[in-house]
Amino acid sequence: MKFRPSITVSFLLWLSGCSATIPAITTAEVAGRQVEFALSKHQTVPVIFENGLGGTLEGWAEIYPKIARDNTALVYNRAGYGNSEEAATARDGRHIVEELRGLLVNQGLTPPYVLVGHSLGGLYMQWYARHHPDEVAALILVDSTHPAQLKGAGAIENWPLWVRWLFDLMTSATAEQELAALDLTGDEVLAAPPYSGGPIIVLSAAQPLEDTSALALDANQKRKDIARLYPGSIQRWVDSGHVIPLEKPESVISVIHEVLLSTQPNDTKPNAIP
């Protein structure tokens, strides 16, 4: 198999998070469990960020402060990450989305929301948008996990040994539970009607397209297929590895501003894209 160094770097970035920080991180009790988050409030449509597998809210450190400056925005850690307490429920999309909705209600954030999800967080946001479309103003998928990501050539048993070893070394039991539930989450996404209630932007990493292994070819085909799952969506290829929020944050910031301009009333629209 051929693997470019960019894949290794992206994998390490994806799992290790970001050295930058997010201001005003706090915790609140939601349904009897402490949840860690950062929140800014303005008179705008709320922008909600969802982390990838093994990632924490710091992964949005290059994006969140610039969005939060003039917009309502929330980043948080799922159960079992950072200072968010573990949950007794299954780590599948259904439970994770319901926990997020509970946090949004707890903090007084009313729908509709602009949902932004990276990697596995993108799959959770797909679950949210398909099952609660009336709560969604727009969907932004940042190199999102495909609902069938672990099927076919993408099955875990086809991963290189070093990838499996690195994953086991650098991830928590919570991340392993989320990975184990990925097929169930994906099946439930595909079983629900596609979201079509607002703008859908698919940001896809272009650099992995140069890899030629069977696993990479499968992943690249699924990158292309994400847009097919959402008729009317716009797919944009970013000159980046998988971790677009850290490698090319400006591409995400630009799309969020673009979507906000199209979804907010004229008297609450943010300033032009800087």
Image (spheres, rainbow, N blue to C red):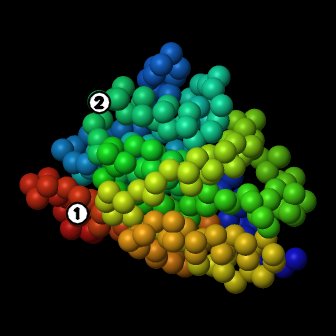
Q: Position of residue 110 (x, y in %)?
A: 27, 37
Residue at image mark 2: 108
**C-alpha gap between disc 1 and disc 2:** 23 Å
Name the image quarter holding residue 24. top left
**Which residue is found at the position 53% from the left and 20% from the top?**
33
Q: Nearer the viewer, residue 194 or 255?
A: 194
Q: Is residue 5 visible?
A: no
Name the image quarter holding residue 112. top left
Which residue is outermost to the left? 267
User: Is residue 89 found left or right of 194 in the rendered image?
Assistant: right
Q: The residue under label 2 is which amino acid type?
A: Gly
SS under mark 1: helix
Tag of residue 224: none
**Which residue is found at the position 62% from the left and 46% from the top?**
185
Residue at image mark 1: 261
Precedes in sequence: disc 1 or disc 2 = 2
Name above or below for residue 160 compared with residue 178: below
User: Is residue 112 found left or right of 127 in the rendered image?
Assistant: left
Q: Nearer the viewer, residue 54 or 229?
A: 229
Count up the numbered dots: 2
Q: Which quadrant is home to the N terminus?
A: bottom right
**Which residue is found at the position 50% from the left and 50% from the top?**
192
Q: Position of residue 42 (x, y in %)?
A: 22, 43
Q: The residue under label 1 is which amino acid type?
A: Leu
SS under mark 2: loop
Q: Position of residue 253 (x, y in %)?
A: 38, 63
